[in-house]
Amino acid sequence: MSQGASFFFFNIRKHRKTMGRIIEVGLGERSYPIMIERGILRRMGRDLKKRKIAKRYGIIADDRVAALFGERLLDALRAEDLAVELITFAPGEASKNLKTIAGLAGRLASLGFDRADGLIALGGGVAGDMCGFLASIYMRGIPFVQVPTTLLAQVDSSVGGKTGVDIPEGKNLVGTFYQPRCVYIDTAVLESLPAAELVNGLAEVIKYGVIYDSEFFDFLDKNRSRIMDLETEPLTEVIGRSCEIKALVVARDEREGDLRRILNFGHTIGHAVEAASDYSIAHGTAVAIGMVAAATIARRMGLLEASEAERIRRLISDYRMELAVPAHLDRQRIRQYLLTDKKTVGGRIFFVLPTAVGKVTITDQVGEEDIDAALNSVYSFPPVKDS
């Protein structure tokens, strides 16, 4: 299956005064808006009050994000007379597990949260995935909204309804599909984060250009300095276009039956690398490695011109992403995680492979030699064997 930029119709509203956007995720009765606007964190209480999603809210955030933005969000909601509690957990991927979920659920129960109440995911992908999963199972389902505070979460994990936690056998193997009621994206919060967090999210941004939109890929190439400097106009375009593409794919294939698999470009090997490193390698770095590996496979299979593969590698490199798997990382562990990944069906490993910048195909016909060659291309030491 190939995917090009002419496949979808979409609906976007731009706010001329604020440089903001509203993007609708079209899922019938479960449709919801993604609101992108600088400073929206301080103003979202008014919008949330109008929507009447819940009578009380529990903000779920890790301790670090709570220190940065917790009081600001509490003040925004309380200014509109909304009842709200801040509930925190230890930061990091290590907290993304069933034990943490049980602790958060116990905290909600002790505070008397019931089916009329709702949750707010404040933070990066870990907070969003856990809060969404918690909302989907607490009292058999309560509403939640997303307030992503990293670029990675803003352009990827906060949109589409995937929730879940990790278990020792792999990443996100326990989870649900559960859509938020709305998503609030404040571009200003990115100014408070380390540069590494920006780079971490840009891997997913580049992914959208490769899988769907060659013009967006070119935009990322031409505006690299402005994007890295967090200029409002190009940054809003980056987040907005990424959300548009994901929203359109999700609207057509909510539960990853077929089309939505294109969003996994770079994730097949990327997730395996991430898990094999015990999550010491950042998600964005792992996806960048996975995209280069996938381009290598596509080139070897005759699906992608060498010049296009080089374009993908060069843009990723230009955005200062590390493209080498550490030498100490056990290759066999990566192989093991490939077989236990959610995208593996009946022992068949599915890969999303680029056929050109802006188009991809999905296949389970990747040979062992091609996988070896892909791993050789991203390891920081010479190949284990000729390929």
Image (cartoon, helix red, strand yellow):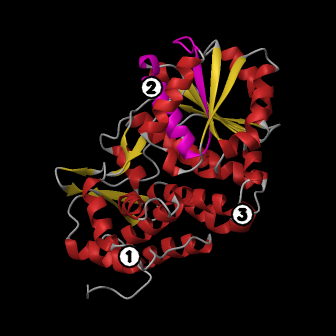
* Left or right placement of residue 333 versus residue 348 in this view: right
Range of magenta residues = 112-140
In the rendered image, which quarter is residue 108 located in? top right
Question: Callout 2, which amino acid?
Answer: Ser
Task: Determine if the magenta segment contains residue 117.
Answer: yes
Q: Disc 3 marks which residue? A: 228
Q: Earlier in the sequence, mark 2 or mark 3?
A: 2
Q: Disc 1 marks which residue? A: 305
The answer to whether residue 299 of the structure is visible from this angle is no
Mark 3 residue element: helix
Camera-near label (2 vs 1) is: 2
**Looking at the rendered structure, which numbered label has been put on residue 41?**
none
Task: Determine if the magenta segment contains residue 206.
Answer: no
Q: Disc 2 marks which residue? A: 136
Question: Callout 1, which amino acid?
Answer: Glu
Residue 312, given in percent of the width and then of the height, sits at 49, 71
Residue 31, given in percent of the width and then of the height, sits at 51, 25
Image quadrant occupied by the C terminus: bottom left
Separation of disc 2 and disc 3 at Cα?
A: 36 Å
Separation of disc 2 and disc 1 at Cα?
A: 44 Å
Question: Callout 3, which amino acid?
Answer: Met
Residue 360, given in percent of the width and then of the height, sits at 37, 59
Toward the viewer: 110 or 76?
110
Mark 1 residue element: loop
Q: Earlier in the sequence, mark 2 or mark 1?
A: 2
* Left or right placement of residue 356 versus residue 244 in this view: left
Camera-near label (2 vs 3) is: 2
Whether 222 is drawn above or below 34: the answer is: below
Label 2 CA crowd tier, 10 Å (few <14, some 14–19, many 20+): many
Mark 2 residue element: helix
Label 1 CA crowd tier, 10 Å (few <14, some 14–19, many 20+): some
Toward the viewer: 92 or 381?
92
